[in-house]
Image (cartoon, rainbow, N blue to C red):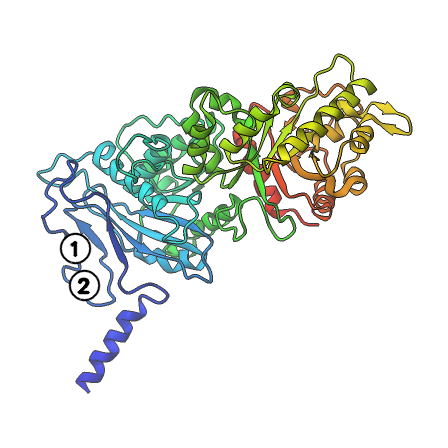
Amino acid sequence: MHGKMVCLLLLVCCACLTGVAAEPQTVFLWPAGHPTLQGANEKEITNPPAPQPGQFVRQFKNIHNPSLEVFLAPKDKATGAALIVAAGGGHRELNTGTEGYDLIEWLHGLGVSVFMLKYRLAQTPNYQYTVEGEALQDTQRAIRIVRQRAREWNVNPTRIGLLGFSAGGALAALADIRFDRGKLDSADPIERESCRPDFVGLVYPGWAPMDITAPPDAAPAFLTSAGVDDAFHARQTVEFFSSLFKVNVPADLHIYARGGHGGGTKPRDGIPFGTWHHRFAEWLADIGMLHKFPTGTGLSFKGPIGVQLYSLRENFAKNVPGTVDQARGFGIEYVELAGTYNLPPQQFKALLNAKGLQPVSSHFSFDKFRDNVEAVATEAKALGVEYVGCAWIPHQTFDEKTARDAVAVFNRAGEALAKHGLKFFYHLHGYEFQPHGNGTLFDLLMAETKPQFVRFEMDVFWVVHPGQDPVKLLEKYGSRFELMHVKDMKKGTPTGILTGKSDVKNDVAIGTGQMNWPAILKAAQKAGVKYYFLEDESPTSVQQIPLSLRYLERVKF
C-alpha cells in the first residue's frame, strides 16, 4: 500500500508537467570565467529547497550564473514565436511560479516556445549588481542567444519577445528602449546578434526612477496593470505607454480598475484583470506572432513577399548595418535593392546574408544598361541577385521615339545579361501609358521587347496613378510580369496623371488605400508573378510596413 501511494504521488507531481519537458535544457548566458561573472560558484537559494522530480522551483535567490531554461512548443503547434519570461520579485528574488513555470502550458497552447530567464538580482546581499547594469546585460544576452540558436530551436529569429512581470517588467521596458542591432566586429558570434526584442509584454511593471525615453524603432508593446489598488505600477505602465506613443511605436494598454499586484495569470475571483492574458494572446495574433505561414503570406496570398530596401533609404543613410537588421526585423526573407549605400557589392551582400536576407533583384540606372551592361552583370553577380532591372527611362517628353530607343536598349541588355544567367526587367512608372495608336506606349514596350530577354515589374501604384487597371493589365500580359511592387495609394489621390511622379505621402499601408487588393493579388497569382516586394516611400514606412504585412496575411480572395 505504501509503495502504491509513493507511485501515485510521483504521478501527480509529473502531471504538473503535462506537455512540458521534464528535464528542460539549461543554457548559461555567459561562458565560464567571463569578466561579468561574480560568485559563479555560489549555490542558488531555492524554494522549495530540494524540489522533487517533476516539481518546479517557485522562487530563486542568490543568482550569480544567469541562465535560460528552454521549453520548446510542441512541434505540431509551434508558430516560431518565442517568449523569454522575466519573473518579478523586487530584484531580491525571482517568483518563477505564477510568473514563470505556471505560464508554460498556456503559452505552448498558443504555439509559443518559452525561455525562462534567471537574471542577476540587484538586491542580492554583498553584491553590487544593478538593474540597468548586470540585470539588463543578462536580458540582452538572453535575446541574442535565442536569436543565434533560432534554427536549432525551431524559432523564427524575427519573432522573439520578452514578457516581464513587475521587476521583470522593468527589464522588458529597458530591453525595448536600450538595444543594439548586433556588435558586428565582436569575436563572439552571440554578441554579433541583435538584442532588440521583436515585441515585449509588461505586466504590472515597476522600476526605480530611470530614463524611459523610447526611440522610434522600439518594439511593439503590450502593457497591463491593475489600477487604484496598484497605483504605483499602473502609473509607471501608463508613463511607459506614453513614451512609446510619443514616437509612434504601436502599443496596447490595458489598465483595469482593480486586481492588486502579482499573481501572473491567476483568475482573481472572476474580475476583468484575471483575463489580461487573453488580451495578450489576441495582441500576439494581431501583430502576427502566432501566424503559422511565412510572414506576409496566408491562406489566400502565397507570396513570396519581400521589401524594396529603397523604402528605408533615409535610415540607410544614417546606419547601414542597423537598417539591414531593421529590415530583417519585419520578418521577411527576400529583398530588392536600389543601391548599396556606399558599400562594395560583396560587402553589402555579406551584410544581408548575415542577417538572413536574400537579395533577389536590383535596380540600376538606364545609362548603365545602355553604356556598360557588362559592369551591371559584374555588380549583379557580386550581389547574388537573379533579376536586374531599370525603373526609369530618362525623358523630357515620353514619346514613341523615346519608347523605341528604350526597347533597343532593353533587348540588347537583356540578351547580354542572359549570357550571365541574369534576368532583365523593366519597372513601369506611370508615364508609359501615353496614348499611342489603339493602345498606349506601354503596349508598344510590351510588343517590341523580346519576351525571352525582357520581363516586367508591375508597380501597382504606378498603374493606378495614370488611371489604368492592374487586373486587366495582368490578364492581358500575364507571365510577362514576373515581379510586382505591392504599393497602395491614399484614398482621394487624383489619378489619370501621366508624369510618373507623386507625393511620397500618398503611399499608405496596404489595405488602407484605394486599391482592390483581393482582385489584384488573385490576378497576380494567376498570372504567375514570382516575387512580390512591398515598396513604401512614405516618411512613415517603418510603421506602415508591418501593417501591410499583417493585411497580406489576412486578405481573402
Residue type marked 2: Pro
**Against 38, is 56 above or below?**
below
Q: Can see residue 488?
A: no
Q: Is residue 348 left or right of residue 262?
A: right
Q: Nearer the viewer, residue 2 or 550?
A: 550
Residue type marked 1: Thr
- Image location of residue 542, percent across then percent down: 52, 30
- Image location of residue 329, percent across then percent down: 46, 37
Q: Can see residue 283?
A: yes
Q: Nearer the viewer, residue 349 or 328?
A: 349
Q: Which residue is mark 1?
A: 46
- Image location of residue 396, percent across then percent down: 75, 12
Query: Exactly how many numbered labels are in the figure?
Result: 2
Q: Quadrant of residue 366?
A: top right
Of the 4 image quadrants, the one containing the N terminus is bottom left
Tell which residue pokes out farthest to the bottom in this image: 1
Q: Nearer the viewer, residue 223 or 345?
A: 345
- Image location of residue 382, percent across then percent down: 49, 31
- Residue located at (47% from left, 23% from top): 316
What is the crowding at mark 1: few (fewer than 14 residues within 10 Å), some, or many (at least 20)?
some
Q: Which residue is mark 2?
A: 51
Marked residue nearer the N-terminal end (1 or 2):
1
Are the two marked residues, 1 and 2, in contact with CB atoms closer than 8 angstroms?
A: yes
- Residue located at (61% from left, 45% from top): 303
